[in-house]
Amino acid sequence: MDEYDYRVGILGATGAVGQTFVRLLDDHPWFTVTAVAASERSAGCPYRDAANWLSGQPIPSPVASLEVQLAEPEGMDCDFVFSALDSSVAGEIEAAFARAGLPVVSNAKNYRQHDRVPLLIPEVNPGHLSLIDAQSWSSEGFIVTNPNCSTTGLICGLHPLMDAFAPEAVQVTMLQALSGAGYPGVSSLDAVGNVVPYIGGEEEKLATEPRKILGSLKGDRVAPADLTLSAQCTRVPVRDGHVACASIRFRGDVGAEAVADALRTFEAPAVTESLPSRPDPFVQVLDAPDAPQPQRHVEAGGGMTVSVGRVQDCPVNDVKLVLLSHNTVRGAAGGAILNAELLASEGYLDRARADAVADPATT
């Protein structure tokens, strides 16, 4: 087996995020989907029959014929799993896989605030991977999470400013796409020509997740960043693309021109350079007065680049700007795949695979 040739399982493979994993992993240079798992309703069926396929592209043929399994570690033919499970079931199932010696790269919220589980964006906090060494599920199993889809776009825009300046507080209004609600999602009677100013749990995630991601390692814990966040989250009639309208207060004298320059010149950590899903650029700054827009810019970098525009001085705080990120790619499946690529390049997946080969009973 080549160094970067891993067998991948997908938990929750028939749902909207699970399908995005299937689509993005087609022809991936390091990862091959060899197992798909879902609920009892789908188990035993070929994937092509179990999935209500939402993409305009055909189901990748190697996956279409795979038999859907129950989301149980026994019999999963893979080296690690991606989890696209709903949070109502993800906690117990992900822990079972980790205890059985299989690494879990999760999109679910259940372990994001666990002290020893990395809440990871590779361009932002790759050093947090060391938290894995303090986990105790088994000798080789572990859990890594990616943030909430709305948190991801905001953090990608904030991190270059954390490096350059000292943000003190952020006030943000999130305009969140319909695809963020999954399928079938929001009723058409609620969505068409309407804005819904409430999304359960989103504002709470935006108040806590950024502080962990931007925080600093203190032994086997993360000391949260000293940053105050106030968020309002609304559902808007856009298919893909979360827009964040943010106003930022700094501890020093910082203006719009300096912020735009910091965003343009930011370079992602060298540890991410070889990762296949790493976009170039990580953040793009758009000068057009009406940018960014989901219809025009959400696919930048294959959906992995975050677009920033409308960078202006703010009369209330210091600087205001607009950020756009692809919620199901950068904010969900694509972000998790990038996390797995970092795990592979840093040797964590090899370590787990070597232990599993030494002791086949663990899988």
Image: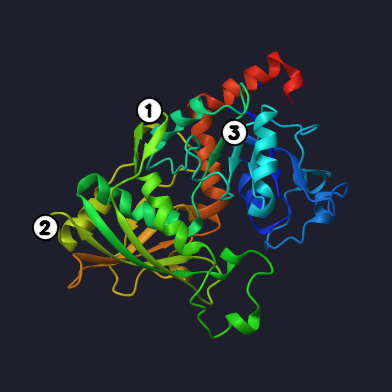
- Identified at 75% across, 19% down, the residue is 360
Q: Residue at x 36, y 33 (%)?
A: 217
Depth check, mark 2 against mark 3: the one in front is: 2
Q: Is residue 61 above or below residue 30?
A: below
Residue occupying image coordinates x 38% and y 57%: 154
Q: Check the picture and name the quadrant holding the N terminus.
A: top right
Q: Who is closer to the viewer here, 89 or 329?
A: 89
Residue 320 seen in render: yes
- Which residue is identified by label 3? 30
Q: Which mark is residue 102?
A: none
Q: Quadrant of residue 121?
A: top left
User: Which label's residue is closer to the chain start, 2 or 3?
Assistant: 3
Given the image, on which type of amino acid does mark 3 rest?
Answer: Trp
Answer left or right for 356 relative to 172. Answer: right
Q: Which residue is mark 2?
A: 253
Graded by Cα atoms within 10 Å as few (under 14), some (14 to 19) or many (20 or more), the crowding at tag 2 reads few
Give the colour scheme of this rendering: rainbow
Amino acid type, residue under disc 1 in the picture: Gly
Distance from the alpha carbon under mark 2 to that under mark 3:
45 Å
Report the amino acid beneath label 2.
Asp
Q: Secondary structure at mark 3?
A: loop
Question: Where is residue 55 shown, x and y percent of the image?
Answer: 67, 61
- Label 2 element class: loop
The tag on residue 219 is 1
Report whether residue 300 is seen: no
The residues tagged by marks 1 and 2 sit, at their Cα atoms, a distance apart of 33 Å
Left or right, residue 231 beside residue 64: left
Question: CA–CA distance between discs 1 and 3?
Answer: 32 Å
Q: Residue at x 45, y 32 (%)?
A: 129
Mark toward the viewer: 1 or 3: 1
